[in-house]
Image (spheres, rainbow, N blue to C red):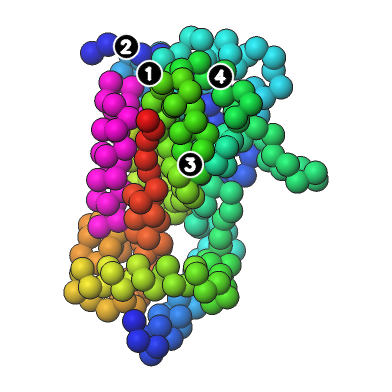
Amino acid sequence: MSKSSVLIIATNYDAGSHYTFQWASDLQAELATMDHTSILLDAGALCRAGTTLADAVASADYVVFFGHGFADELTALPAGSGGKTVPLVNGSNMGVLAGRKVFAGCCHSLAKLGRTYAKQFSAEYVGYDNVFAFETANHHYFRDIVNNAVVDFVKGASGQTVAANLQKAWAGLRDAFAGGGILQYRPNAFAAAQYAEDNRKRIGYAP
Amino acid sequence: MIRDEEQEVLRALQEWAFSHPQKDRPFLIFMGRSFTPVEYYYEVVENEEFRAALFQFLEEQAERSKERPIDMIVRAIEANRL
């Protein structure tokens, strides 16, 4: 198996990103045990840090993002009193990703940023074209699906294959939480099932 | 779902939310917004699109599992008691 270098960038400033930062940390540990090289950086510290992001991307084959996103933005910092978020990557600086394969574990970014990036840099981008959601009592099941998909990507699966496998995995999780499923008696199972299904509908890739 | 079934689901959802052991802590994360069980209940009651999505999902799953739409909520109420 060829070894890859993975740059994981995550935020950790609210309830949602608190969980996904844990997922990012768990992913880094898993990649390390597979003998891949991985770096985990906090997006909030990167956004105003000069060339740090570019330097980190330069050492990576894959860029993985966990946090918040919009159609045209991976978010570094939350909106302050001015009401505007601070982007890590958006349309104006997407070149910093330098054609790396990107996995975006956040809302919306495939819809515009991902498709534009993939077209402009002939690179693969896996992400969600609408809201990405999870349920906290069962967040580790959601984490496992996301992190396993990243591992497949890093092991060489195409973006198309990763997205297709994610669709199957989300459907499997939906069924596990639904009536007759192995997880049907878990707390909040109805919501976990519903948003596993929504994630299934919303995962995609570009090009 | 017929209207009686919808009302039945809403009543069960209210029981689930207000008897939830962590009713004031976020349980559902949309990356950018979160809901506590109680906030979720009120969102279902007040947001027609949100409510319709839940009802449609419950109906689809009930049909697939050959059970009633309310049964997934009833299981969640029981899970809160454990």
Residue A169 is one of the magenta-drawn residues = yes
Task: Say which quarter of the image contains residue A77.
Answer: top right
Reading the image, the residue beneath label 4 is A95
Where is residue A56 shown, x and y percent of the image?
54, 13
Secondary structure mostly taken by the magenta-highlighted segment of the chain = helix
Reading the image, the residue beneath label 3 is A111
- Amino acid type, callout 2: Lys
Within-10-Å neighbours for mark 1: few <14, some 14–19, many 20+: few
| Chain letter behind tag 4 | A
First in sequence, mark 2 or 3: give its number: 2
Please tell me whether mark 2 or mark 3 is closer to you in this view.
3
Quarter in which the N terminus of chain B is drawn: bottom left
How far, Cα to Cα, is label 1 from label 4?
Answer: 28 Å
Q: Residue at x 73, y 42 (%)?
A: A84
First in sequence, mark 1 or 2: give its number: 2
Can residue B8 be seen here? The reply is no
| A167 with respect to B64 (left or right) | right
Task: Say which quarter of the image contains residue A50.
Answer: top right
Chain part drawn in magenta: A150-175
First in sequence, mark 3 or 4: give its number: 4
